[in-house]
Image (tube, rainbow, N blue to C red):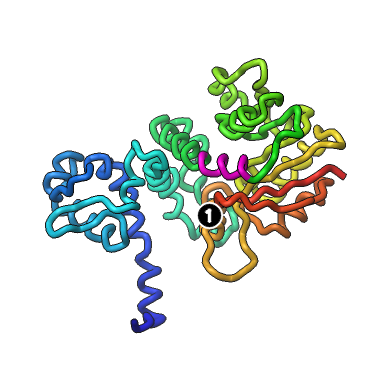
Amino acid sequence: MREASPAATLIEITTGHILPRCLHVVAELGVADALDGTPRGAAELAAAVGADPDALGRMLRLLAAHGVFECRGDAIGHSAMSRLLRSDHPHSVRAFARMIGARHNWAPYGAMEHTLRTGRPAAPEVFPEGVWGYLAQHPQEAEVFNAAMVAKAHGMVAGVLGAYDFGAFATVADVGGGSGHLLRAVLDAVPAAAGVLFDLPHVTAAAAPLASGRLSLQGGDFFRDALPGCDAYLLMEVLHDWPDAEALAILRAVRRAAPPHARLLVIEQLVPDDPGPAWAKVIDVHMLVLLGGRQRTRREYQALLEQARFRLERQIDTGAGVAILEATPV
């Protein structure tokens, strides 16, 4: 096969937004849900989801060329990837595809030049209230966002539990833990342990049904309020939301609360040192544009940990796209 010319490769990259936008809107309309094991024509599918038959057929043709759905003559059938867009699939990525294609994620890229020129996130240029404020005012998008985060976390949580033994801890704090999916899984795995879910007051209020004799809720702001004293602290995909100064402030808040024997587990996607393509490099730019955050290399996390008076003990690969950086107070 002839290798593409530099010009052809650049043109392909330049128009690279078209394919994912097709995926976003097809996921939003629930096309995969309307398709069972029997291939259907584009007109029949369009009627089921409220789409234009010609537009749907052409978008599905493009997606099928990349393995999402299959074109079988004039009919459309499922592929292994398109089945993952069904809402009822146990490993469904439909909510994630809808979330990435939602306005709060997509619109800031129209103002991306602002980020490049200033180093600051573009989202406030589109949403003066910021991404979180926008979601607070748009509950339907917030619902999709929450569903996407829970679905995304399932695989990560399984990987973390498979890679790390939590049995030595009597108390575990999940800092910025949201709905508490990681903490609940840890407590299920270690019946003798108790846990504290620490997050903003409105987040812990929504998680009130989780409270039990073993799982307590503490509402607060980790930039201002004291964290609980525990044997272990979990920070799963929290630090990547923030620039270095704020990430360091969070780590220092943990250090102030942590007893000498405690363990800190930073759970994040690490940027690899090699120069090739990596998912973490994509998410790094996404965090920059939306929040001013960043994905980091192991060395960058180690530097932050040392500034916060933690020693990085080891890096553990979970096999689920994230690594565990285990650190101890110094």
Q: For numbered disc 1, what is the local secondary structure? A: helix
> The C terminus appears in which quarter of the rendering?
top right
Q: Is residue 64 above or below residue 167?
A: below
Quadrant where the image shows the N terminus: bottom left
Per the rendered image, the range of residues in magenta is: 154-162
Percent from the top left, x then y, of residue 276? 55, 70
Residue, x 60% and y 29% (percent of image)?
184
Residue 161 sits inside the magenta stretch:
yes
Q: In x, y percent, where is residue 21?
A: 33, 54
* Residue occupying the point 57% across, 20% down: 210
Q: Report x, y in % for residue 253.
A: 77, 37
Between 294 and 68, the residue placed more toward the observer is 68
Residue found at x 36% / y 56%: 20
Residue 218 visible in the picture: yes
User: What is the quadrant of residue 70 in the picture?
Assistant: bottom left
Q: Is residue 172 above or below residue 83?
A: above
Left or right of residue 50: residue 220: right
- Dot 1: few (<14), some (14–19), or many (≥20) neighbours within 10 Å? some
Q: x%, y% of residue 60? A: 23, 55
The residue that disc 1 covers is 283
Of 73 and 202, the residue lying toward us: 73
Q: What residue is at 17 percent from the left and 44 percent from the top?
A: 45
Query: Of the residues shown, which amino acid type is indicated by label 1?
Result: Ile
